[in-house]
Image (tube, coloured by chain):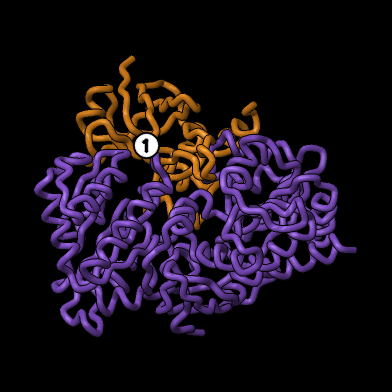
Amino acid sequence: MIYKNIVCPLCGCLCDDIEVVTENGRVADVKNACAFSKSKFLNHAKDRAKPRIKKNGKLVEVPIEEALDEAAEVLKKADFPLIYGLSSTETDAQRLAVELAELIGASIDNTSSVCHGPTIQAAQDCGAAKCTLGEVKNRADLVIFWGCNPAEAHIKHATRYSITPRGLYTESGKKGREIMHMDVRETKTSKMANIFVKVEPGQDYELLSAFRAVLKGYDGGDVAGVPSETIKQLAEKMKSCKFGVIFFGLGLTMTGGKHMNINAALRLVRDLNDHTKFAIIPMRGHYNVSGANDVMTWCTGYPYAVNFSKGYPVYNPGEFSAVDILARGECDAALIIASDPVAHFPAQASKHLAKIPTIVIDPKISLTSLIAKIVIPSAIAGIECDGTAYRMDGIPLRLRKVIDSEFLPDREILKKIIEKVKA
Amino acid sequence: MNYMKVILISGRTVEQGTSLEISKTSEEYSNNVAMIMMNENDMKEIGVKEGENVEVNTKFGSAVVRCKESKIDHGIAFMPYGPWVNMVIGADTQGTGMPDSKGVEAEILTTDKDVLRIANVITQIKGIK
């Protein structure tokens, strides 16, 4: 069976031109896919999790209903449960996770607290001039990659949206676009750019502010290892383009200053709109982390780090964000769904997951599942079940099912847990 | 024993991203993630060759990883996202929710120790007080 125009459930690019060939209930071939996507589709059947419960210190395989019963019991008993993850699943499952959080008075957080949480905080402070990837493809003649490495993280971004594609007003493709790359280290992305600007580590805020100063007629001198003349020349290029866009990554959100770095970037874009058309888009990592923010916002009013212990949603990153709750050892149970904090949180935070009853819902054997008390396997959204995901620019796209699965989708698992908690 | 102070950055690599889709308990994942990239001169200064192990120490913890030569600048080192770099990153988010996963001050030392296997990393995480 050949499926065309499949949406890829890997990164925030949500490339919708994937061709999947299936044979005997397995993915046999994938076309138009990047290395990550190919690896996800071709290895979907490998290393699958099984329903397990920890008994006498060992994880033993149990019937799925027993794992679901035990999960509901743990969540019912908990005084301060944490629900975390959500970014590698579809929007119905995300909505049900919020419903469960409200039901049990949990804190609920998605992976944006350790990726673009600071981006959201900055946008809440000063707004963001955004656009779609389609507008970038059809209109942008200046593309800036700041603190990101799409050549190794969003592999088809350059060919589908930002560097080489020919669009309505960008008929000459790459030739008609100026590409800048600002980063602390030269990467494969620098090679795709016309201009690479090396920024001293931790000096992004200063360089962004220097550009803003130059636009307002001031000369801040050499900043972040970049000569004053270069800053002026680049600012002139930004002012004189027809349609500019900044794509930025965790090089801005994960370094000192965090949301203040993004704040400076968003304000630079706002200032540039006095001269020309300019927009800014965060390079979202997980394929539906953008959806996790949107779903949580339309369910609770807040994008992440939400607590329901008072019976209504309260938002406070730093207090109700997962790393902080875990590092302070506050939660007494955790439900981890569609993410792997043990692989990606500081060990000082993930250690707490080993001390409390942790429930993991994941298609694969994750590192978190190795320290969990209960493991519930699920179908892979976008391969083994359908759903909706939001692209990095906020455009929702429909994920399709290409393989029948013995596993339940995340949304069915959550529905069953909710029913059991209510019972 | 030679050592050097660096600014440590963590991030995505193609090899990390493709091998985690295969299995995080695989040799391939460990080989692609339990490593640090440094420039040629910095490696010479410490006295470490491509493929040899180094110990990475920060005020938050310690990890032993394989050293790989890269065109990165002097004084900067890069580790792929994963449980080994997690050992040397702090959990303080300064009230933002986001730990300092890039730009951590670290000390790189030569070592005779082996890289921890994934099962041992999990045991170590469980043992943190």
Q: Position of residue A155 (x, y in %)?
A: 34, 63
Q: Which residue does the image show at 73% across and 70% down from the upper left? A: A412
Residue A87 appears in the picture as rendered:
yes
Q: Count residues near mark 1 (Cα–Cα under 10 Å), then give few for <14, some for 14-19, many for 20+.
A: many
What residue occupies the far right of the structure in this picture? A423
Residue A407 appears in the picture as rendered:
no
Whether B3 is drawn above or below A317: the answer is above
Q: Which residue does the image show at 44% across and 54% down from the upper left? A: A122
Q: Which residue does the image show at 64% across and 26% down from the upper left? A: B129
B37 to the left or right of A50: left
Q: Considering the numbered disc 1 on the image, is that residue within a helix, a strand or a loop?
A: strand
Q: Position of residue A317 (x, y in %)?
A: 57, 48
In depth, the one of A286 and A55 nearer the eye is: A286
A379 to the left or right of A34: right
- Chain of the residue under label 1: B
What residue occupies the far front of the structure in this picture? A217
What residue occupies the far left of the structure in this picture? A229
Q: Position of residue A103 (x, y in %)?
A: 79, 60
The quarter holding residue A71 reads bottom right
The colour of chain B is orange
User: Disc count in the image?
Assistant: 1
Chain letter, colour purple in render: A
| Amino acid bearing label 1 | Gly
Q: Which residue is mark 1?
A: B103
Which of the image's four quarters has the N terminus of chain B? Answer: top left
